[in-house]
Amino acid sequence: MSKLVIVAIGGNSLVRDNGRDSVQDQYEAVQETAVNIADMVQEGYNVVVTHGNGPQVGFGMRRSEIANEIAGMPDIPLVNCVADTQGGIGYQIQQALTNEFTKRGINKKVATVITQVEVDINDPNFQNPTKPVGSFFTLEQAEEMKKEHPEWIFVEDSGRGFRRVVPSPKPIDIVEKEAIKSLVNAGYVVIAVGGGGIPVIKTRDNSYLGVDAVIDKDFATSLLAEQVNAETLIITTGVPRVYINFGKPNQLALEKITVEEAKQYVLENHFPPGSMLPKIEASLSFLENGGKRVVITNPESLKDAINEKQGTHIVEQLNEACCM
Ligand SMILES: Nc1ncnc2c1ncn2[C@@H]1O[C@H](COP(=O)(O)OP(=O)(O)O)[C@@H](O)[C@H]1O
Ligand SMILES: NC(=O)OP(=O)(O)O
């Protein structure tokens, strides 16, 4: 299928910076992103949408813990928190896109696929939690919480504060890939691998079993992009472009870089794990496995990014023809 673009929406980009983090705030952020995706559809692109859940799955985990501490309610396992966010955010994106298409008279159907993603139980990432989830805390708040919950692990997240981390194994297969492909080929705008997918392992008797982890949605998106033969991967996040020396006085925005340049910047540690590094690694994997182009930008810049007026573009060679 020509002009197939996969758009990954960052979980943090759906959280408003107003301290409320309400469901309604999130829906308004989703609606704004839906307008930008509808612009792309109107320009003739076939679109697959994926999304993160880092903040939301952490909120869900915390709600479960508090309900358990205060009211003795049974804990919700992390894998179910992931499934809940996949359904909840998928519902919002599906509704916002459907409404936007109806408003504009675009004849496109939207479907969200509850997606399980297989991981390896021997993946070393299970022993070394790296995926930041939930709210941001000050160092003092994090130290205070650690006194009560010594098992919690916090990391500093890109100058934005401290967050709890959970295991994040690498995705190895998308269980529902054939269903996703069928819907894409039937002309649907498909929402899939939400929150990186619901992590499952295959047991000896070939059954699937959920495991407690949060898969990085950038890696899951890159795997899905390869499996549906997408030409272009667009990762939307909280910044319009990727920077070197991010957050420092000599910070520099990257407009268009090659795979080789991106690899060099990785070696020079310009991209922190748990935030920008997985986006770059997922981009490189996509480009090295048949993808043509990657764009990293914020949701509001999607339209400009398609026309190379905004965003960081990663390509195999710098002389790649402009635009998608
Ligand atoms: N080199 C960099 N260039 C741009 N942003 C960076 C860089 N390093 C860290 N960041 C931070 O990483 C964030 C993206 O990671 P994150 O918020 O975890 O992603 P997501 O949008 O998928 O939830 C950006 O919004 C920015 O704050
Ligand atoms: N699962 C995941 O990677 O979520 P974020 O993109 O929100 O971090």
Image (tube, rainbow, N blue to C red):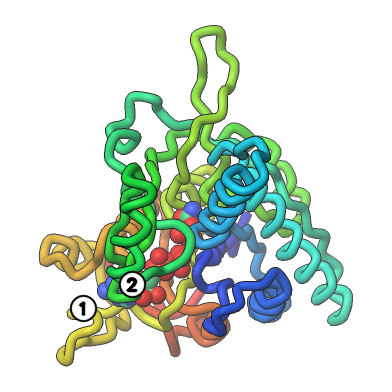
Q: Position of residue 76 (x, y in %)?
A: 61, 39
Q: Is residue 59 left or right of residue 271?
A: right
Residue most extreme to the top: 205
Q: Is residue 104 left or right of residue 134?
A: right
In this rendering, is residue 293 above or below 196?
below
Q: Position of residue 49 (x, y in %)?
A: 62, 60
Q: Is residue 324 left or right of residue 120?
A: right
Q: Secondary structure at mark 1?
A: strand
At label 2, the amino acid type is Thr
Comparing 198 with 282, the one in front is 198
Say which quarter of the image contains residue 102.
bottom right
Q: Earlier in the sequence, mark 2 or mark 1?
A: 2
Q: Is residue 279 visible?
A: no
Say which quarter of the image contains residue 294.
bottom left
Comparing 124 with 113, the one in front is 124
The residue at which mark 2 appears reads as 138
Residue most extreme to the left: 268
Q: Position of residue 217 (x, y in %)?
A: 48, 53
Q: Residues within 10 Å of mark 2 (few under 14, many from 20)?
A: few
Q: Secondary structure at mark 2?
A: loop
At label 1, the amino acid type is Ile
